[in-house]
DNA sequence: ACCAAATTATGTCAAGTGTCAAAAAATCGG
DNA sequence: CCGATTTTTTGACACTTGACATAATTTGGT
C-alpha cells in the first residue's frame, strides 16, 4: 500500500505541512487522504471526488475523514495548498543558477515548465482548477499564486536579457510566455495528440520567446496598441 | 422571458439543429432548455448543472426534460454539439477574404480568436470542457473538432506567408499559435486580471507569430530537436 | 500489562440526484 | 369547438452525497 508517485518530475506532487501533536499514524493518515484525493482527481476528475471514494481509495471509512477535516471544503483546501506549495522552490533554483547565461537559464525554465505540463498530474489537475477557479475565489487565489511565481521567474530573466525594457512591458512579455506555455496543456499534455512533438515545441517556444525579448524596443508595445 | 445572448461576438452562442415534426412550442422548449443549460454552466459551473436547475432556469419542471432528452447525458451531448457547431463558419470567412493580404488576414484571425476568448461564454465554458475531456471521450472528440478547425485556418495562412515550409512544420507552427492563444483564457479572459491588456497581447501575438512564420527555414524545427 | 489519548468504524440523517409512469394541460388543423 | 397529438406537470422510486453522533479499536508511554 506504498504511495506510488503519480509523476516523474522536478516538481513534487504534494508538499504537505506536517501537523503538530498526535501519533505517527495520524500524520500518515493525513497524507494518505490527500494523496488519495489527488489520485481520484487525476484519474476520475472532480465529479468523482467524493468523501466515500477518497476514503475507499486509502482503505478508510468515510466517517474517518471527518476526524481529519471538519468539512469536505476544508479537505479540498488543504489539497490545493499542498498542490500549489509544491511549486514554491522549483523555479527559483533555475533562475538563480550562477554559472549559466541568461539565455540558457531561460531555455531551462521553459523546458521545466513544459515538461511539467506533460506529466499526468499537471495535465489532469490544472484544467480542473481552471474550471473551479471561475466560481471559487479560494481556488482562484491559489492558482493565481502558482502563476505569479512563474511570471516572477520569467520576468527576472527578461530583465537580464533586455535591461532596456520597462517593467510593465516586461510583465506583459512574461505573461505572454507563461500563458502560451500553459495553453500547451490541452494539446501536448499527458496522453494528448501532440505530446511527442513537445521537444520541438519547446525549441520553437524558446526561439520565439527569445526573439520577442531581444527585438522589443522600449515603449514599442504601448505604441502598437495606440497608447 | 426573451433569450438574452451571453456574449457579443462573431461566434454565435449555440447552433441548434431544428427537430422534425411537433408544435412550434416544442422547438421553442428545446432551445430554452439548451440555453438554460449553457447559462447554468457559464454562471455556476458544471457541478451546478443538474436537471432540476436547468428546468427551473427555463421555467419548466424537471420531469419535462425527460420528454426532450431520454437522459441527462444526451442533453449534454446536444448542448456540446450546438456549442461546437457554432464555430463552423466563423474562421473560414476571414481566411478566404480575397481583398486582404495574408498578413492582414492572419492578424484578423488572431484578433477573432483572442476576442472570442474574452467573452464570458468562452472564458467560462472551455475550461470546463478541457477538464471534462480528460475523462469523457465524447467531449474530447468535440473539443478536438473545434481546435482542428482553428488549426486548418491558421495552417492555410502559414502556407501563404511562407510557402517553402513543409506541411509537418506548418502544422507544428499552427499548433503552437493555437495553443498559445488558448492559454490566454485563464489570464486575459472574461473578468481575468490581464483582460484590459488583451489588445496589447493581440499585437504581441501577431508580431511574434508572424516572425516565426517568416523566419523559419524548411527543416529547421526538426534540426533543432536533433532529428 | 495498563490506560488515557488518538484514531477508526458504524450507523443514521436530511437533502439532493436522475429516471420514470401516469395524469393533466396546451396546441392547432379540421 | 372538436379531438388527436404534443407538451407539461405531478408524484414517486432508488440511489448518492456530506455531515454527524457514538461506539469500537489502536497507539505508545508508563
Image (cartoon, coloured by chain):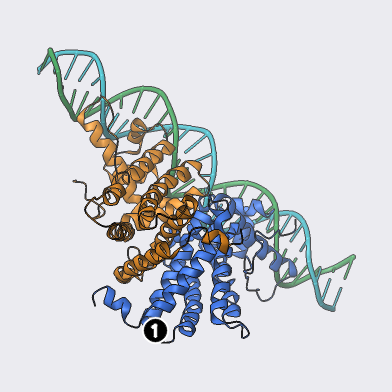
Chain colours: A blue, B orange, C green, D cyan
- The answer, for residue B226, to whether it is visible in the render is yes
Residue A123 at x, y percent in the picture: 54, 58
Read off the chain for label 1.
A
Q: So how many labels did they put on this image? A: 1
Q: Is residue B5 above or below residue A130?
A: above
Left or right: where C3 falls relative to C20: right
Q: Is residue B163 above or below residue A93?
A: above
A31 or A151: nearer the viewer: A151
Residue D5 at x, y percent in the picture: 26, 19
Left or right: where A57 falls relative to B173: right
SS under mark 1: loop
> Toward which corner of the image does residue B185 lie, by quadrant?
bottom left
Crowd tier of the residue under label 1, counting other residues whose Cα lies within 10 Å: few below 14, some 14–19, many 20 or above: many
Q: Is residue B156 above or below residue A9?
A: above
In the rendered image, which quarter contains the C terminus of chain B? bottom right
Residue B123 at x, y percent in the picture: 36, 58
Residue B1 at x, y percent in the picture: 19, 46
- The answer, for residue A135, to whether it is visible in the render is no
> Toward which corner of the image does residue A171 lie, by quadrant?
bottom left
Residue at the limit of the structure toward the front, as seen here: B164
B104 or B140: nearer the viewer: B104
B222 or B132: nearer the viewer: B222
Check disc 1 and report the residue beneath it: A165
Amino acid at each position: 500500500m506504498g504511495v506510488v508517485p503519480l509523476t516523474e518530475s522536478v516538481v513534487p506532487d504534494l508538499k504537505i505541512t506536517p501537523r503538530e501533536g498526535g501519533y505517527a499514524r495520524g500524520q500518515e493518515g493525513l497524507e494518505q487522504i490527500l494523496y488519495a484525493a489527488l489520485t481520484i482527481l487525476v484519474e476520475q476528475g472532480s465529479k468523482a471526488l467524493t468523501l466515500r471514494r477518497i476514503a475507499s481509495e486509502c482503505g478508510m471509512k468515510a466517517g474517518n475523514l471527518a476526524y481529519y477535516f471538519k468539512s469536505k471544503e476544508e479537505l479540498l483546501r488543504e489539497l490545493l495548498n499542498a498542490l500549489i506549495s509544491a511549486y514554491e522552490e522549483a523555479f527559483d533554483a533555475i533562475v538563480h543558477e550562477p554559472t549559466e547565461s541568461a539565455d540558457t537559464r531561460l531555455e531551462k525554465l521553459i523546458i521545466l515548465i513544459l515538461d511539467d505540463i506533460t506529466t499526468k498530474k499537471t495535465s489532469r489537475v490544472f484544467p480542473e482548477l481552471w474550471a473551479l477557479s471561475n466560481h471559487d475565489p479560494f481556488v482562484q487565489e491559489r492558482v493565481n499564486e502558482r502563476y505569479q511565481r512563474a511570471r516572477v521567474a520569467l520576468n527576472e530573466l527578461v530583465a537580464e536579457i533586455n535591461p532596456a525594457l520597462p517593467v510593465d512591458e516586461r510583465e506583459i512579455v512574461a505573461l505572454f510566455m507563461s500563458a502560451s506555455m500553459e495553453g500547451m496543456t490541452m494539446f501536448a499534455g499527458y496522453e494528448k495528440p501532440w505530446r511527442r512533438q513537445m521537444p520541438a515545441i519547446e525549441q520553437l517556444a524558446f526561439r520565439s520567446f527569445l526573439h520577442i525579448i531581444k527585438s522589443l524596443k522600449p515603449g514599442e508595445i504601448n505604441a502598437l496598441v495606440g497608447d
